[in-house]
Amino acid sequence: MNDDREVPGASKHPTITHHARGPGAVAHALEQLVRVHFARSFVQGLKPAQWHALRYFAVMPLEERTVTAFARHRGSTMGTASTTISALVRKGYLGRSSGSARNSGLFVTDAGHELLRDDPINELVRAIDTLDEQERAVLERALPKLVGQMGGDAS
């Protein structure tokens, strides 16, 4: 069967039509990868955004461990970031180093570090590790560029 033939009633929209190759195929594969990872990130009583926050606060320098910096990094509102952080504080995975001020320094607690050992992103890391060196190098260069093109923060 010829994949290039027109199907009656099929959409001409490039993100809806079937893509066997090219940018459309890459976009569909990336979307599927994100959906699989997202679905597997509802574990240990956390939501994907909470896992992201734990990772963020585990690696960022002290001056970047604030609600404001996290909201900017996530591209979210202060309210959304604050809700995510408050849930992690309530669960005992994040602590505040300077009292309860909105922009006090936040840190991952011992319980949070223990939880990060079972971080669902580790499955994705293992999958990426199966790629050869050249494939990983291409991803390392290309993905931050794509994130930047979409207006996101690749860090």
Image: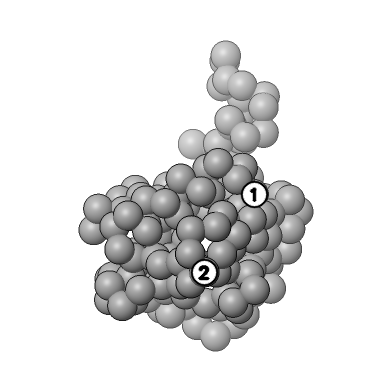
Q: Tell me the amino acid under the disc marked 1.
A: Gly
Which of 111 and 145 lies nearest the eye of the viewer? 111
Task: Pick out the residue farthest to the left.
Answer: 44
Which sits earlier in the primary sequence, circle 1 or circle 2? Answer: 1
Residue 155 as seen in the image, left or right of residue 101 = right
Please tell me how many numbered marks the rendered image carries.
2
When the figure is inspected, residue 10 is found, relative to residue 99, above or below; the finding is above
Which quadrant, please, contains the C terminus?
A: bottom right
Which of 43 and 141 lies nearest the eye of the viewer? 43
Q: Residues within 10 Å of mark 2 (few under 14, many from 20)?
A: few
Give the secondary structure at mark 2.
Answer: loop
Residue beneath disc 1? 75
Note whether residue 95 is visible: yes
Residue 138 as seen in the image, left or right of residue 84 = right
Residue 148 as seen in the image, left or right of residue 20 = right
Q: Which residue lies at the image location 73% right of the left edge and 63% below the top edge? A: 145
Residue beneath disc 2? 98
